[in-house]
Amino acid sequence: MTSAPPPRRRWLRLGHLDLSDLLVETFSVLLGVLLALLINSWVQARQTGHKVAEAQASIHGELMADRKRLATMGDYYHQINQQLDAAMKTPHPPAHCDDLPDWKGLITPLLVRAAYDTAANSGVFAEMKFEDTSRIAGLYAELARYEAFSYKVEDWMMGQNLAGHGQGFDASMCHAFLGDLERSAQRVQGDLDAYFGASAPPP
């Protein structure tokens, strides 16, 4: 009967764990941690991308709606100015723009910026490209300046109307101010069209 071969000597044993087993377990743990970090990073990047895309879509829709409001107001100003041009050439021009048949008052555009404010407060702009954020901020600043100018015109003309004992808005003042509002609206519309990437007005 032959005797069993002597047990193979191991160079290093840690308790009941061989060095090779320890290396395998350590590698497995590190690989698991690395995979978890990669998955977490991918999930966060995906969520951030979704938030940015959602914010951009909301801002695009909001700017599109503001552009349509500006176009409506610009058309109205242009129509009134044409009527004033024609009326001024008559033997008895109207003293007040209130006398025009299509006069609907000093209508100021109700521009909105809810999507922009939401994006700013949520920190989404920090995840967007700087040039995109800067361009969007510039467009909203233009809209805010235009709206402020509209309200100043309205306040000034209302004050003149009260000073004239409510007889109406002076026709020559209407002509001048509505011309300025029309040109300003067209400039902002042009910048919005450039942002949308189309030379023609959006549908």
Image: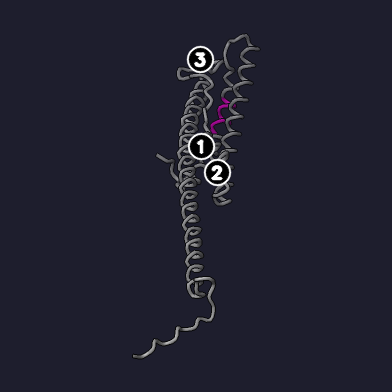
Residue 136 shows which numbered tag?
2
Residue at mark 3: 99
| Magenta-span inclusion, residue 127 | no
Q: Distance between the residues labelled 2 and 1?
A: 11 Å
Q: Nearer the viewer, residue 3 or 116?
A: 3
Name the amino acid, label 2. Ile
Range of magenta residues: 175-182
Q: Which of 197 and 106 is in front in this view?
A: 197
User: What is the crowding at mark 3: few (fewer than 14 residues within 10 Å), some, or many (at least 20)?
Assistant: few
On screen, residue 21 above or below 41: below
Residues at discs 1 and 3 in contact (Cβ within 8 Å): no
On screen, residue 11 above or below 187: below
Q: Nearer the viewer, mark 1 or mark 3?
A: 1
Q: Which of marks 2 and 1 is in front?
A: 1
Residue at mark 1: 115
Q: Where is residue 23 in the image (x, y as percent from the top left)?
A: 51, 72
Q: Nearer the viewer, residue 51 or 85?
A: 51
Going from the N terminus, do you reach mark 2 or mark 1 first?
A: 1
On screen, residue 131 above or below 65: below
Kind of element beneath mark 2: helix
Q: Which of 150 and 164 is in front in this view?
A: 150
Q: Quadrant of residue 124?
A: top right
Going from the N terminus, do you reach mark 1 or mark 3 first?
A: 3
Residue 78 shows which numbered tag?
none
Q: Position of residue 200 (x, y in %)?
A: 43, 43
